[in-house]
């Protein structure tokens, strides 16, 4: 029976964890570092959307200050020059709300929403890339395990043949060179087994890294071995163009680039908004305190008589003037009284008309248009890359299918030739050199059919994935 029909179960130790392909994909999507990093970009863009929305709200800011001065100073309330120690404090509250800004705020909100959608699709693309990498590593393990089994069977066959030839040599039926060459071949087969085991461990290590399993090692890691059928000899039921037409509408890398074209258009609108005037509503409240500000209490009205002269210069005949006044008594101007008395309020609108700003707005518009052309080219590049990947996978799948059919016929021929060479060697009709030629042809045919089988299965799963189907084995 040809090795292409081999199916074997993987033996595990009690400490091993056996992973199915779906478990690997699910765990990788949740824990892979690159995928988690792309999730941070999604969170960042979501915050950018929230900030763009919040820019429509009023802004409110407060300030406070306190200071002490010595020597000459200008009283902030009376504006008098004083030469004394003074303590002062100021408080203010400002508010403003944009009324019109050339629609820049609205267009920024729309652009940031588009950027968020594109970033979410980028995360989906990272997940898809991870899924394909996991499937590749998973199938590489399966391939290497089949090669290992084949190498083990080759070793067993060579060992049996070497033991038989040793008996024939002792009986004088074959020369000693046959024994030596088969022993050398046995050592070579053992080396191939070690190499295959190393390849399995490397593939398992790659899968462990993709899954971000911190404490796992190839020694305690195993995957489920599914039964994979031989490639179907019938023609593949779809062509590369059909796959591309489906993939173009569902693959996140295409949709994200298309959305970024829309985002670039909004960036142009934002840049053009700087040509328009801006209108905002603002208001403020402020108050202050100064320890050097004088404060007096006013008493009741009292008459005051003053001499303003005399009659004909006779001091005995004074001329007097009487008036009413209130007595002012200096006292402390209380802190909170000053704050209440000095309270000022303001409300108004502000109009800013752009006239000339060193061509900054015009250049920003031109840069935004360049960004649009770049986004359009990125979309075309992504489509071309997708088309190329699908065409390559389809060509490889068809080629692997044909190689499998040819390799199966070749294996049957070389297997029969090997069996005949084995019989003739045992009867002393051929030497070990001719026997090794037949054996090596058989060994190569075994490897070729295994490689073709797994290459075909992987490429076919790759094409099914681009059609939106779930990858299963």
Image: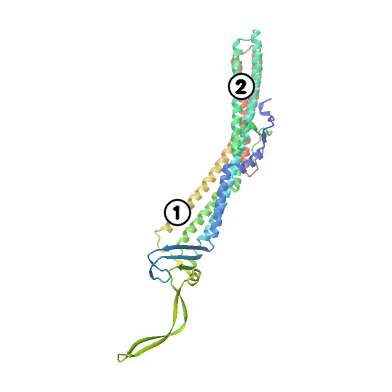
Question: How packed is label 2: few (under 14 Cα within 10 Å), some, or many (20 or more)?
Answer: some
Query: What is the x, y in percent for residue 96?
Result: 50, 65
Decide which of 285, 65 is in the foreground and name it: 65
- Point 57% across, 50% down: residue: 42
Q: Is residue 424 visible?
A: no
Q: Is residue 245 left or right of residue 70?
A: right
Question: How packed is label 1: few (under 14 Cα within 10 Å), some, or many (20 or more)?
Answer: some
Decide which of 40, 446 is in the foreground and name it: 40
Question: Does 130 appear above or below 104?
Answer: above
According to the image, label 2 marks what residue? Answer: 190
Decide which of 363, 240 is in the foreground and name it: 363
Query: What is the x, y in percent for residue 399?
Result: 59, 34
Q: Is residue 219 left or right of residue 313?
A: right
Query: What is the x, y in percent for residue 438?
Result: 61, 19
According to the image, label 1 marks what residue? Answer: 367
* Sequence-first tag of 2 and 1: 2
Q: Is residue 448 visible?
A: yes
Question: Does 313 appear above or below 175?
Answer: below
- The N terminus: image quadrant: top right
Query: What is the x, y in percent for residue 163?
Result: 66, 14
- The C terminus: image quadrant: top right
Secondary structure under badge 2?
Answer: helix
Decide which of 173, 334 is in the foreground and name it: 334
Q: Residue furthest front?
A: 316
Q: How is the image coloured?
A: rainbow
Q: CA distance from mark 2 to mark 1?
A: 65 Å
Q: Nearer the viewer, mark 2 or mark 1?
A: 2
- Point 60% across, 48% down: residue: 249
């Amino acid at each position: 029976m040809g090795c292409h029909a081999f199916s074997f179960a993987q033996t595990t130790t009690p400490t091993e964890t056996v992973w199915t392909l779906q478990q690997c994909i699910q765990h990788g999507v949740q824990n892979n570092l690159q995928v988690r990093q792309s999730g941070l970009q999604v969170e960042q863009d979501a915050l950018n959307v929230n900030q763009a929305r919040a820019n429509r709200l009023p802004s409110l800011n407060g300030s406070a200050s306190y200071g002490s001065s010595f020597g000459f100073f200008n009283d902030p309330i009376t504006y008098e020059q004083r030469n004394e120690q003074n303590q002062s404090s100021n408080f203010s509250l400002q508010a403003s709300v944009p009324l019109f800004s050339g629609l820049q705020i609205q267009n920024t909100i729309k652009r940031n929403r588009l950027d968020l959608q594109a970033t979410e699709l980028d995360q989906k693309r990272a997940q898809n890339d991870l899924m394909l990498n996991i499937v590749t590593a998973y199938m590489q393990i399966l391939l290497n395990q089949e090669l290992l089994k084949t190498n083990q069977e080759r070793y067993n066959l060579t060992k049996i043949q070497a033991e038989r030839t040793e008996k024939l040599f002792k009986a004088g039926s074959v020369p000693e060179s046959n024994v030596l060459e088969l022993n050398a071949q046995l050592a070579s087969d053992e080396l191939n087994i070690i190499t295959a085991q190393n390849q399995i461990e490397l593939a398992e290590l790659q899968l462990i890294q993709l899954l971000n399993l911190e404490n796992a090692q190839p020694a305690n890691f195993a995957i489920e071995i599914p039964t994979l059928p031989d490639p179907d000899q019938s023609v593949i039921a779809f062509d590369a163009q059909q796959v591309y037409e489906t993939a173009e509408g569902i693959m996140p890398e295409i949709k994200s680039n298309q959305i970024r074209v829309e985002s670039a258009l909004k960036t142009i609108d934002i840049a053009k908004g700087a040509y328009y005037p801006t209108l905002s509503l603002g208001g403020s409240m402020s108050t202050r305190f100064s320890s050097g500000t004088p404060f007096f209490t006013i008493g009741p009205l009292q008459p005051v008589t003053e001499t303003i002269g005399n009659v004909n210069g006779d001091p005995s005949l004074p001329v007097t003037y009487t008036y009413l006044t209130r007595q002012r008594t200096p006292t402390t101007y209380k802190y909170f009284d000053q704050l209440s008395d000095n309270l000022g309020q303001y409300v108004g609108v502000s109009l800013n008309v752009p006239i000339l700003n060193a061509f900054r707005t015009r250049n920003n518009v031109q840069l935004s248009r360049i960004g649009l052309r770049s986004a359009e080219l990125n979309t075309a590049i992504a489509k071309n890359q997708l088309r190329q990947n699908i065409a390559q996978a389809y060509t490889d799948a068809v080629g692997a299918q044909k190689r499998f059919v040819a390799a199966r016929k070749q294996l049957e021929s070389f297997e029969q030739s090997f069996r005949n060479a084995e019989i003739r060697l045992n009867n002393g009709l051929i030497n070990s050199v001719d026997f090794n030629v037949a054996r090596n042809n058989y060994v190569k045919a075994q490897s070729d059919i295994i490689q073709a089988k797994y290459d075909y299965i992987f490429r076919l799963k790759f094409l099914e994935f681009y059609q939106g189907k779930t990858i299963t084995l």
